[in-house]
Amino acid sequence: MPSKPFSIALAGNPNSGKTTIFNNLTGTRQKVGNWPGVTVAKKEGKIRHRGLDLVITDLPGTYSLTPFSIEEIVARNFILDEHPDVVIDIIDSSNLERSLYLATQLRELDCKVLFALNMTDLARSRGIKIDTDKLSELLAVPVVATVGNKNEGMDRLLEAAVGLAESETDTARRRRVKYSKDIEAAISELQQDLVRECAETVPYNPRWTAIKLLEDDKVVKERCVSVAADRGRALFEKTDHLRRRIMDLYADEPEIVMTDERYGFIAGIIREVQTNATYRRVDISRNIDLVLTNRFVGFPIFLFFIWAMFQSTFSVGEYPMQWIESGVGLVSTAIDALLPQSLLKDLVIDGIVAGVGSVIVFLPNIVILFFFIALFEDTGYMSRCAFLMDRIMHLIGLHGKSFIPMLMGFGCNVPAIMAARTLESEKDRILTILITPFMSCSARLPVYIVLAGTFFAGHAGSVIFAIYLLGIVMSILTGRLFRSTLLRGADAPFVMELPPYRVPMLKSLMIHMWDRSKMFLKKMGGVILVGSVVVWTLSAFPRTVSYDTDYAAAKREAITAFNARIEAAAPDHRQRLEALKDESLAELERRQRFEKAEKSYMGMIGKTIAPVFAPLGIDWRASVALLTGFVAKEIVVSTMGVLYAVGDQNEGDVLQQALQESGMTPLSAFALMTFVLLYVPCLATVTTIRQETGSNGWMLFSVVYSTGLAWLAAFVIYQGGRLLGLG
Amino acid sequence: MTAGSGSVPDDAMKLSETREGQRARILRIGGNGALRRRLLEMGLLKGTDVVVEKYAPLKDPMELIVKGYHVSLRVEEAAQITVDPLE
């Protein structure tokens, strides 16, 4: 018995139900569907089965193992380099022919393969009958029938996987795809050369390596170059020679001929194992599509769904937001009562609770938005969105699939940028990543709400809508600009499966929502907490400020003066004078706090950079708010709260009043909103861009480009507006 | 799996020129490597029968039924595929 846990990898086509089986087996969080970022990240689950430790890895869903997309490379490299004990190939029974294409490729690798014949119920209902024993016998592979979404066959699957892992099966002796005579000749010729020249250095099965070289597989070629060094040259000359020979014989590229022959081999198997009933069942999925992608009603329905998603996210989300706000208020009151007056108390209430509280209110939005996105993904509607939108996205030089990241960008740019992974072409991916930050994320919304609510009270909604629209327009312009300059070239083929509609599983929706919320909370707990504390520190220090006015003396004077007047006044006037006294004391207090804010480190920074923002109609306080917004855009609001309203408990109304008194005009507020929309995305997004493009260069480019564009757009709006006499 | 072009029927047309509901047999797949490769992997091979299920509301992309499943591709991609209309 091995002490090391067995490693089991799950492979399969997108929409084969692989993720559902993974969830069933491990209970680990994952979502279903072939959309954004689904399984590109390697997902693992550790379980115990009959006293054995198993590590189950969910590989990305792929149709093939050519290095056509990141997913395929990830899946293949895992099998090649990590040597899992067993690879379970999840096969969509209702799509046996296409599923077997991946299966034949898996079998060409040196690994123990097990087939899970999934969705057998669906296949049966479509009148497809598969002879499981015959399939197992023909391919010399154990086959287990499963119904993933009903949790059927999972025990048998694990049993079979463990059995296979423990067995001494000779993987080399199984029946493989036999290619036609000339190709087999080329393979064995190259294989012999490989064994002779660099058997010890090329880490993979020589027959497989020979096939891949003949197919001009870039990844394998590079690997051979790196290990074979000088001896590689002869090998590649031989490969080229053999490739030319095949091309002459078949008038086609070897990879095409070989794909054709694999399908020929599969067709033979299908003939022996599959029988189709002659009757054609009413196809529910097809009927749904008659409506949902209908020429006339398809778009209206699509727009309705998107509208419903946004309405629910922002209107329904309003109620829990209010509860959270009151909750945060209670916490800060409680702390106020519990702690003695100290610097620590200020830090906790004004720095931590206020900062985190201003962010946690967005949790309901995130939960609802991702509920809808998961719903779209799990039902299969997401690919219909791409189907409907591709024409439009293609105009910007993008793929229909880019619509999804951009749509998700309205929720939060971080998962949105991660969602760009599903784009196969690197250029499409980078372009999508660069323009997604212009989709106004939900964190920017509170900034608009405060500004539009203050300066465009009657039609705040329309103004916010205009800002969102501006973001979309900027992304289109940027897309077209980059597509014709930086990222010129053909976009990837739009060959996309439209999977049958499925009833979503509640568990999967919950897992998905929980995942996203957890991500958001983690971001909040870490990055934003630190950000809030930094902002608080910068605005609370230096603790002692030398004021222009001696406020203490001024207050004493005011008190003395008023007291004297109160003494002298008639009794019925005294009350009015008392009120006046309080008012003027409050005014002095406000001016003192304002001066303190002005002379804090934050104020100094703001005044230093103010000249850059002056042409945009943005004053030093808003400049500071923008700076702090780099940590997370929602912080812009809390910074403005500190700098304008100078920290009163009842923040909302006081901030609005303070903003109006600060000399900001509707025009400069609009310029400020434009700047917030377009300028450098938040820290977390920038980090994600770095991670997803794998390059500091693109990250820097994105930061510089977006901030430059923001400045320019705000400048045009503010100065243009003033020329038109709007300021 | 025969070599060369073979005989092309007189009514051969581009897949992009087919109408909704049309059944057709694939005669030839052109285009660049990535597209051809992808089409082949998804099971669109010479000799495969396809049904044109529909065009998207904006007339692009189009939806096909191939080997019992639904796949969409752009009209400009479909223009690389030569088909023989059936019935």
Image (spheres, rainbow, N blue to C red):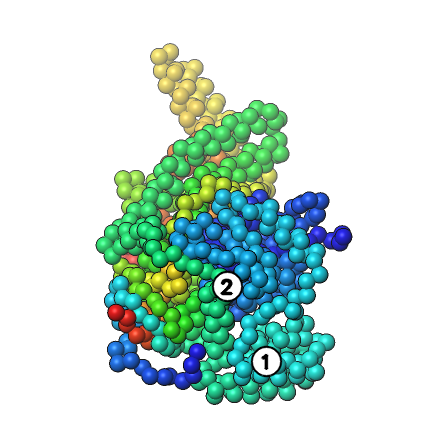
Q: Residue at x 36, y 84 (%)?
A: B6
Q: Secondary structure at mark 2?
A: helix
Q: Residues within 10 Å of mark 1 (few under 14, many from 20)?
A: many
Residue A85 rendering spot, x and y as whole percentages: 67, 58
Q: Residues within 10 Å of mark 2 (few under 14, many from 20)?
A: many
Q: Quadrant of residue A580?
A: top left
Residue A288 rendering spot, x and y as whole percentages: 31, 50
* Relative height, residue B69 to residue A255 (above, below): above
Q: Quadrant of residue A695?
A: bottom right
The kind of residue tagged 1 is Ile
Q: Is residue A275 visible?
A: yes
Question: Which chain does tag 2 point to?
Answer: A
Say whether disc 1 or disc 2 marks the residue closer to the N-terminus.
Answer: 2
Q: Which mark is residue A187?
A: 1
Task: From the image, tell me which residue sits under label 2.
Answer: A100
The kind of residue tagged 2 is Leu
Q: Residue furthest top?
A: A571
Residues B4 and A128: in front is A128
Q: Residue at x 36, y 38 (%)?
A: A315
Residue A175 rendering spot, x and y as whole percentages: 59, 69
Q: Which mark is residue A409?
A: none
Q: Is residue A60 visible?
A: no
* Relative height, residue A9 to residue A665 (above, below): below
In three-dimensional space, the C-alpha distance between marks 1 and 2, rounded to whole angstroms, equals 22 Å
Residue A93 rendering spot, x and y as whole percentages: 47, 56
Q: Residue at x 48, y 87 (%)?
A: A249
Residues B32 and A291: in front is A291
Q: Secondary structure at mark 1?
A: helix
